[in-house]
Image (tube, rainbow, N blue to C red):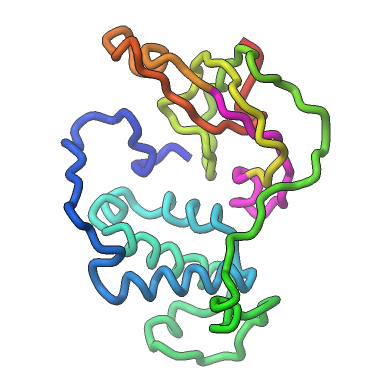
Amino acid sequence: MDSVHDMGGTDGFGKVEVEKNEPPFHAKWEGRVLAMQRAMGYAGAWHIDHSRFAQEKLPPVTYLSASYYKRWALAMESNVTERGFATPEELKAGHAQTPGKQLPRKLTTDVVSAGLTRSSFYRQQQGPQKFQPGDKVRTKNIHPATHTRLPRYARDKVGVVELCHGCHMYPDSVATDKGDDPQWLYTVVFDGREIWGPDADPTLKVSIDAFEPYLEPA
């Protein structure tokens, strides 16, 4: 999706200021947002790509003016209402007004204490691997109206396959509720000048993880 969230290589945002001794959270509500997001993911309410897509759909002014965890919270509200777990009126009231929608499982303190881990994104291959390490590839010049993991700055660029990571859930499909659609995932290395132009540092290399549908032989 082409929107303001995809700002890699975009001018005008100034220097990245690193906060010294930055705490994990700047306010208690941020920790609660993280906990709720993990709980809903564990319960099977949605996948991480649904969360990413919900943030990408925020109005540009909202996205740029909201803090990191505020965007998470707004995206969660969107997913909760769009997927029928609560109504806007219930969110505003702060309590349920109708019977709740059942979820496959519940995140409890026992689960967290036992060592909560992220689910695997590996999936059984659905076809042969198209590219091998050392192959020269070109990223496609795509502009989907929905979620994608191929950033704008890396489209229509020539690079070399460095690694193959096996088959994984395909974010572009998952985010639009079209199933896992497993795809091969590769690390592709680009010369910095290929990405940023002739004035870029000639020693710079840029690596991205790209799914097979993003690539074609160069």
In the image shown, does 1 or 131 lie closer to the viewer? 131
Q: Is residue 35 above or below residue 150?
A: below
For this orientation, the residue located farthest to the top is: 198
For this orientation, the residue located farthest to the front is: 114
In the image shown, does 181 or 178 lie closer to the viewer? 181
Image coordinates for residue 214, horizontal then vertical, percent? 60, 28
The magenta-colored residue range is: 171-188
Tell me which residue sits at (21%, 40%) in the image: 16
Image coordinates for residue 42, horizontal then vertical, percent? 60, 70
Q: Is residue 26 left or right of residue 59?
A: left
Q: Is residue 108 magenta?
A: no
Q: Is residue 69 left or right of residue 167?
A: left
Residue 3 found in image quarter: top left
Tell me which residue sits at (66%, 35%) in the image: 165
Q: Is residue 38 left or right of residue 67?
A: right
Q: Is residue 148 above or below residue 115?
A: above
Residue 7 found in image quarter: top left
Tell me which residue sits at (51%, 92%) in the image: 97
Tell me which residue sits at (70%, 51%) in the image: 178
Q: How many marks?
A: 0
Q: Is residue 198 above or below residue 192?
A: above
Image coordinates for residue 111, horizontal then vertical, percent? 60, 78
Q: Is residue 200 left or right of residue 73?
A: left
Q: Quadrant of the C terminus?
A: top right
Image coordinates for residue 14, horizontal then vertical, percent? 16, 36
